[in-house]
Amino acid sequence: MEAKVVVYSTPTCPWCKRAKDYFKNNGISFKDYDVSKDKAKADEMVRKSGQMGVPVITIGSHVIVGFDKNKIDSLLGTH
């Protein structure tokens, strides 16, 4: 089963766009939450990561703050 990938992002964040483009280009399905518009998801993001900055990416139970391609690849078993 593919790990469940969630991206907490904002529309103006270049690293968020880079992360989402990376998932799209590699055929990795993900759920995207715009935390600038969804306060509940913003609160959830802070609870999970302890961070206000975006992107926050969760893969299964793992939390990644920022676009850490090596960590993402390691967790997904890609590249």
Image: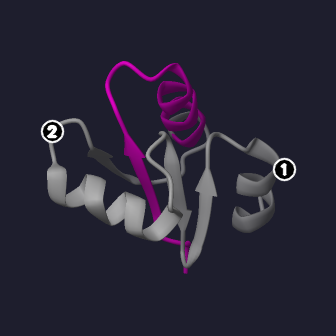
Q: 10 Å neighbourhood of mark 1: few (<14), some, or many (≥20)?
A: few
Magenta span contains residue 10: yes
The picture quadrant where one finds residue 67 is: top right
Colour basis: one colour
Q: In the rendered image, which quarter is residue 19 located in?
A: top right
N-terminal of the two: label 1 or label 2? 2
Q: Which residues are magenta?
A: 1-23
Residue on which the image places disc 2:
37
Residue 31, given in percent of the width and then of the height, sits at 34, 54
Secondary structure of the residue carrying numbered label 2:
loop
Of tags 1 and 2, the one toward the viewer is 2
Q: In what element is the residue under mark 1?
A: loop
Q: Residue at x 62, y 57 (%)?
A: 64
Q: Nearer the viewer, residue 29 or 57?
A: 57
Does the magenta segment cover residue 17? yes
Inspect the image, locate mark 2, and give the three-letter code of the amino acid beneath it: Lys
The x, y position of residue 72, in whole percent, is 71, 54
Q: Is residue 69 left or right of residue 19?
A: right
- Find out whether the residues at labels 1 and 2 contact each other: C-beta distance under 8 Å: no
Q: Residue at x 53, y 52 (%)?
A: 28
Location of mark 1 (residue): 79
Q: Residue at x 15, y 38 (%)?
A: 37
